[in-house]
Image (cartoon, rainbow, N blue to C red):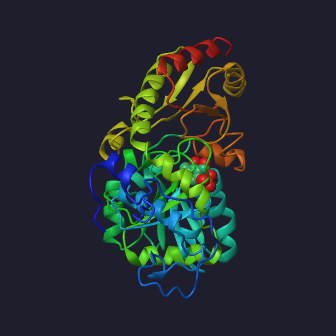
Amino acid sequence: MVHYGGFNTRAVHSGELRDSRFGNVVTPIFETTTFLHPNDDNAAYIDATRGSPYLYTRWGNPTIQALEEKYSALENSNHALAFSSGMGAITSTVLSLTSSGSRILSLNELYGQAHGFFSEELPRYQIRTDFVPIDEINSLNFKLKDYAAVYVESITNPTMKVTDLVELSKFCNENNTPLVVDATFASPYNQKPLDLGCSVVIHSGTKYLSGHSDVTLGMVAASSAELHNRILRMRTTLGPTMDPLQSYLALRGIKTLGLRMEKHNRVALEVAKFLSQHKKVTGTFYPGLPDSKYHNIAKKVLTGFGGMLSFEVTGGLDGAKRLLKHIKIASVAASLGGVDSLVSLPLETSHANIQRAERLKMGINDGLVRFSCGIEDPEDLILDIESALAFV
Ligand SMILES: Cc1ncc(COP(=O)(O)O)c(C=O)c1O
């Protein structure tokens, strides 16, 4: 598949399903579960998942495939699949790469629900995961044992540590081990993991891709047809295919991804700089800050540092709760990556299902605050945070 143009041109035009019989500019919503079968019209559109006319929406649907094609253009990939959630994408991908007796290498610092899948669900099928701290992954301080896959997050949620995908993918490719990366925090605007040598990239498209906190979505792009087909088979079997109506909303959201990410990148850097100089803030975690431990890796693997950051304030959990109580612009809510700023305590949201000792090992202290910078004016966000910090 040849993709034309730069990132924003692709975000607007790639995948759009235009039919000269109607002259439509925007892709229609094919709200249909089933299609005429057999369809003997020689001009019938082809379902990419089957290589023949559309049959049934759990396999493929024109609106969903428009989304898949647009997203694959952004990842410089030939293959992509849309799921009904990020977790649908993660579970289908990992199950497609493993079988009973498989072993996976992963990070300690994973998103809570993904961590639960690896640590609690997969062992029931004799699939075991070795969790290793990200710094050991980055220094390749592990012995590759016949792993069925290596699974990482490119920027960890919510600790904002950055995986060195350049070195790790080199290592995995030399050992013929698929490297799967959840690049949700980076977005395809700031990072294209397949170009860095990874085998599969996953997004919770619920976040930056859709961008407006109104769509639940997972996306997967694979580096080869073989991997793509395995994941497709698992999606068709488990059933977490995206639906046409939500695909339409995601198609619309992605058109402005580049514009939004430029603003998210700028806003987060300004907020991070402000926080890092405030006397009531005891730690600011943002890879775009020059004194971040991960700044050099981030410069190598990212073209922008993203809209997410986390920080700790004096008074620990009590201080953090006071802060959240007085913040006015950002909504106190889980999730991230939308145009409106959101703030949360990972203790109560993304990592609520993780035992405290395990959570502390991940570097998530009780009082850690996660902030998803939206596209508001940074001076307003800073003024608001500054006012709330007075109550800490
Ligand atoms: C990094 C990361 N990956 C995956 C997911 C799961 O995505 P979804 O909520 O769309 O299932 C999340 C959700 O917060 C996340 O933060």
Q: How many marks?
A: 0
The answer to which of 218 and 275 lies nearer the viewer is 218
The answer, for residue 280, to whether it is visible in the render is no
The residue at 58%/18% (across/down) is: 385
Work out which quarter of the rendered image holds the C terminus and state it. top right
- Residue 320 spot, x, y in % from top left: 67, 25
The residue at 61%/73% (across/down) is: 58
Q: Judge whether 294 appears above or below 376 on screen.
A: below
Q: Judge whether 39 appears above or below 162 on screen.
A: below
- Residue 66 spot, x, y in % from top left: 46, 62
The answer to which of 223 and 31 lies nearer the viewer is 31
The answer, for residue 96, to whether it is visible in the render is yes
Q: Judge whether 210 appears above or below 242 on screen.
A: above
Work out which quarter of the rendered image holds the N terminus and state it. bottom left
- Residue 378 spot, x, y in % from top left: 48, 21
Q: Quadrant of residue 19?
A: bottom left
The answer to which of 142 and 116 lies nearer the viewer is 116
Q: Is residue 292 left or right of residue 357?
A: left
- Residue 263 spot, x, y in % from top left: 42, 31
The residue at 32%/55% (across/down) is: 166
Residue found at the far front of this picture: 21
The answer to which of 9 and 305 lies nearer the viewer is 9
Q: Is residue 24 left or right of residue 83?
A: left
